[in-house]
Structure formats: C-alpha cells, structure tokens
Image: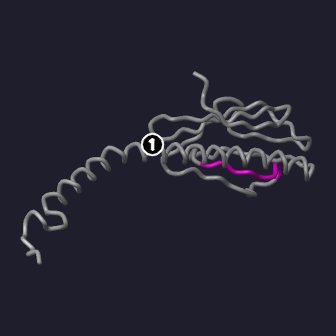
C-alpha cells in the first residue's frame, strides 16, 4: 500500500498557478475588448443605416400603392427620420439611431418627397458612428433604388 505524501503526488492547482492563469486571462480580455467594441459599433452602424434605407423604400412603396405623395424627413436632431403622408404632419413610421450616431443629408436635402408614381430627386444621406465611421445611403430618383455602401474615398 502506497502512502500519500503531500507535495509531488498531490493533484490539483496551487494558488500561484491559479493567480497566473487569471492574470493571463485578464490581459487577454483587456486586449480583446476594444476590438469587440469596434465590431459592435460597426454592426450598429450597418443596422441603423439599414433601418433608414428600409424607411426610404417603404416611403416609395406607400406612395405607389396608395397613389399619394409620401415624404421622409431627417429630423433636426439628426438622429431620426420620419415617414409621413405629404399632406399631414403626423408620422406613419419613425426610425431613431442610437445616441452616438448621426445622419446628415449630403445631397438632395433633408426632406425627400416620393410622388404617387414613385419618383423622387436623387439623394444621398450619410450615417456616421463613433470614430468617424460612415455609411452612405443613396436614393436613385428615377428607379427609386435605395442602396447602402461605404463612402467612396
């Protein structure tokens, strides 16, 4: 029968080994968090631009389906856009971006009015997130096509 001697044969981890492993994990987490944050901001930027593009597509669809003009207005806060019938003030739908994001009209103005036939003037709106990252929403006036892309340098 073998006797158990503390020290060499003991199974388990020492407190020092545990502290070293926790220190390594903490260091790895500290390096990984900024990268995860940038990825999250990028996803939120794409999602926000996608929601605004969807609102513009819906405005065209509503104008054609109901044969009445619709408009999409970039609100003064530059964090929201609203879809409404052209004759009324009350919005049918509104899209708001997170606090750290902004929109601006770089071409075509802050109000886009879709005719009952789906026509609108060419427009370009930019959505900007933290760190200056931007996505551009382009509206083709004749086809009504709405596209989201990175800005061309």
Part of the protein shown in magenta: 80-87
Q: Residue at x 86, y 48 (%)?
A: 63
Relative placement, left or right, of 17 versus 46 is left
- Along the line of sight, the residue nearer the viewer: 86 or 34: 34
- The image quadrant that residue 134 belongs to is top right
Rendering coords of residue 23 (x, y %): 21, 53
* Residue 11, placed above or below residue 120: below
- Along the line of sight, the residue nearer the viewer: 27 or 89: 27
84 is within the stretch colored magenta:
yes
Which secondary structure, mark 1? Answer: helix
Relative placement, left or right, of 13 versus 58 is left
Specify few, some or many for label 1: CA neighbours under 10 Å numbering under 14, 14-19, or 20 or more: few
Rendering coords of residue 106 (x, y %): 64, 30
Relative placement, left or right, of 68 versus 16 is right
Rendering coords of residue 129 (x, y %): 51, 41
- Along the line of sight, the residue nearer the viewer: 129 or 29: 29
Q: Residue at x 75, y 39 (%)?
A: 112
Most common SS among magenta residues: strand
Q: Residue at x 59, y 43 (%)?
A: 46
- The image quadrant that residue 152 belongs to is top right
Relative placement, left or right, of 95 versus 98 is right
Quadrant where the C terminus sits is: top right
Quadrant where the N terminus sits is: bottom left
Q: Which residue is drawn at 70% across and 45% down?
A: 73
Of all residues, the one furthest to the front in this rendering is 1
Rendering coords of residue 89 (x, y %): 75, 54
123 is within the stretch colored magenta:
no
Residue pointed to by mark 1: 38
């Amino acid at each position: 029968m073998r006797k158990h001697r503390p020290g060499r044969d003991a199974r388990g981890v020492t407190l020092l080994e545990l502290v070293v492993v926790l220190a390594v994990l903490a260091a790895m987490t500290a390096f990984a968090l900024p990268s995860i944050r940038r990825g999250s901001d990028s996803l939120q930027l794409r999602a926000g631009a996608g929601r605004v593009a969807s609102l513009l597509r819906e405005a065209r669809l509503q104008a054609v389906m109901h044969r009445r003009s619709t408009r999409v207005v970039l609100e003064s806060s530059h964090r929201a856009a609203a879809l409404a019938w052209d004759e009324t003030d009350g919005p049918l739908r509104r899209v708001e971006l997170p606090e750290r994001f902004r929109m601006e009209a770089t071409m075509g103005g802050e109000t886009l009015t879709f005719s009952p036939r789906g026509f609108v003037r060419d427009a370009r709106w930019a959505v900007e997130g933290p760190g200056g990252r931007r996505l551009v929403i382009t509206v083709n006036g004749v086809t009504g096509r709405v596209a989201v892309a990175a800005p061309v340098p």
